[in-house]
Amino acid sequence: MDVVEVLPELHMFRFRIGQAYLWRDGDELTLIDAGGAHDGPAIIAAVRDLGFRPEQVRRIVLTHGHPDHTGAAAELAARCGAGISAHRLDAPVVRGEAEAAPPVLLDWERPLFEHALTVPPAPPAPVDRELADGDVLPFGGGARVVAAPGHTDGSIGIHLPGHGVLFTGDAVAGHEGRAILGVFNTDRARALESFHRLAALDCETACFGHGDPLTAGAGRLLRASADRHAVLEVEHGGTLPGA
């Protein structure tokens, strides 16, 4: 696992597939997403290497219910004493009470999806707080929950308006210094609407579930990319990768 400083108060944990983020408010930590089922020890070690104690992780916020984002949530919650938050529509998946809806794959996504199937299943994790659009979480000066369905029904973004930071989960991905629509969506039309909704937010830094963060002018870049995707969707029916 790689540890990358995004901002002085924000670090990215990059795994073999996907990534998570650690936000610091003084001596209190928040983990946004939780990696795969085998990533818990590496996350704990990284927290310690950054000079913190595991019990300083007060909350784990899950952007959606896929196993590369929820796999270590139960282990980390138990070891850190942290509460877990997830959108109410993905909370049953996180708890192991329901199966995640399968994606509707475009032809070019199929080889990528075969690789993603190597992610181990996520152990069921308790969800202490079920989130809804507009909820405000007590970190980052007031972290706003932004519903972003389409990748999954309960996908969310997390916006820190006071810091100009946006966590998109898998609704948006980073690719070669730009933003693209995330892959493996259950409803591509809703996913594109969510891309536009997230892109409309004021942010300087955008942190994705996959791909390098944008750390300057992220809002402008997201809006330009969302507009480009809308045009390509009309012209090519979403058949082009990336965009």
Image: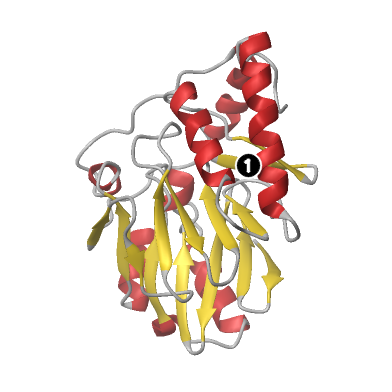
Horizontal relation, residue 190 to residue 161: left or right: left
Relative to 182, residue 76 above or below: below
Tell me, yes or no, if residue 111 can be seen here: no
Q: Amino acid at mark 1?
A: Ala
Relative to 203, residue 10 above or below: below
Q: Residue at x 55, y 64 (%)?
A: 21
Q: What is the quadrant of the N terminus in the image?
A: bottom right
Horizontal relation, residue 89 to residue 45: left or right: left
Q: Secondary structure at mark 1?
A: strand
The image shows residue 176 at horizontal and vertical percentages of 80, 42
Q: Quadrant of residue 127?
A: bottom left
Q: What is the quadrant of the C terminus in the image?
A: top right
Horizontal relation, residue 165 to residue 94: left or right: right
Provide the residue designation for mark 1.
173
Q: Quadrant of residue 30?
A: bottom left
**Observer-nearest of 21 and 193:** 193
